[in-house]
Image: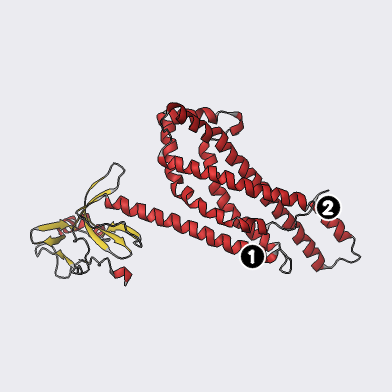
Amino acid sequence: MSFRSIIRRDSAQRKTKTAPAKESTLKKLNRQEVLFEIIKTEHEYVRDLRLIEELFIQPIKKAEEKSKKQIVPENLNKVFNSISYFLFIHEVISNCLNERQEAQSPLVRSISDILLAYVWVFRAYAPYLIHYEDALRELEKSIRKKDKLGRLVKTQQKLASCRNMPLSTYLLKPFQRLLKYPLLIMNLLKCTDKDGFDYENTVSLKTKLDQVLNDVEEQKRSHDNMERLRELETRIHGLGPFRLAVNNRQFVRESPACQNIQNMPSPSLRRSLTVVSDPNKRHSVRNLYTLECNDIVLLAERTGVTKEGQHLYTLISRPPTPLDDEPILVHKPEDSVSKNAMVLIIYTFPSWLGRC
């Protein structure tokens, strides 16, 4: 007998059924559906993690042991390690949920206490999220090059147990599961009576889950920001010992220093605007870019592009020091610019300004 029929039978035994009673019955039905969905989808998630482990991770490890050579790139290896850990811990969670379902059959009364005890697990998703995109690129490269890893993955993907889905699809499963948990817990909270014995646990579960997921998101954001700063450093000539990639520095944008220069009616006027960085050096304004962070703004000249199409720069403003607050002025040739032309002033803010 299904939980729906049990709840309806209990309700039918009442002599009168008021509107609040009907609403309460519907709420109980919805709550059971959410509880069963959590248990069912957790089981399916473990099934997919086990498939990755048994069809891909273990065969790849055996191939490495046989050849005595690592064939898995760094980021993909870290994602594999995360998935192996997810499988271990989520099997425990799924088993606990299944045992609770059997013990309380046919109606599940509570599972929030179980999930609350394991909510800390989601902090372990930060390394997976950090390395996921790079891992996918490494996997695609191996398959495209048809190296040993790529050939092995292609072979395993043809197995019937893969259900016609590539490894890249399965590697997305932890991310999808991470997004689904807050929705499931929110639905569970909506369907739980405030005077019910499981309400406080469900509220605590939602609160702690939100906190943990916010921490994970912040770790991912901080990592991406640091990688962006490191990448930008490699494209700037003239930084010397100064480093962009430091803690608490947030990248904002890189953009043309003079945003409206393309709107000037005269091409000769655009070419004639220059910046004087020292008495012997002038730089065309159309090649000047500002590299903005939360605590500094650097003025640099575009000198080329990388293979990926990113700009290369030479620093015009001096690397920031605590006393570096002098403006750099745009040079204005008398024969090319009218007296009313605006003068561009770019400040290089000292690195300590953002910490004051």
**Which numbered mark, 2 or 1, is in the foreground of this view?**
1
Could you tell whether 23 is left or right of 278 in the image? right
Name the quadrant of the C terminus. Answer: bottom left
Q: Position of residue 355 (x, y in %)?
A: 32, 69
Q: How is the image coloured?
A: secondary structure
| The one of 185 and 288 positioned closer to us in this rendering | 185
Per the model, the C-alpha gap separating discs 2 and 1 is 28 Å
Residue drawn at (44%, 46%), measured in percent from left and top? 131
| Label 2 crowd bin: few (<14), some (14–19), many (20+), radius 10 Å | few
Number of the label disc, if any, that sits on residue 104: none
Residue 46 image offset from top left, x and y in percent? 62, 43
Determine the secondary structure under disc 1: helix
Q: Which residue is mark 1?
A: 203
Q: Earlier in the sequence, mark 2 or mark 1?
A: 2
Q: x, y (%) of residue 33?
A: 72, 53
- Please name the amino acid that badge 2 sits on: Ser
Residue at x 42%, y 40% (from the top left corner): 137
Question: What residue is shown at x 56% (from left), y 33% (from top)?
Answer: 55
235 to 47, vertically: above or below: below
Residue type, numbered disc 1 = Val
Mark linked to residue 5: 2
Q: Is residue 41 visible?
A: no
Q: Residue at x 41, y 40 (%)?
A: 74
Horizontal side of 112 relative to 20 (left or right) equals left
Residue situated furthest right in the rendering: 15
Observer-nearest of 78 and 288? 78
Quadrant of the rendered structure where residue 349 is?
A: bottom left
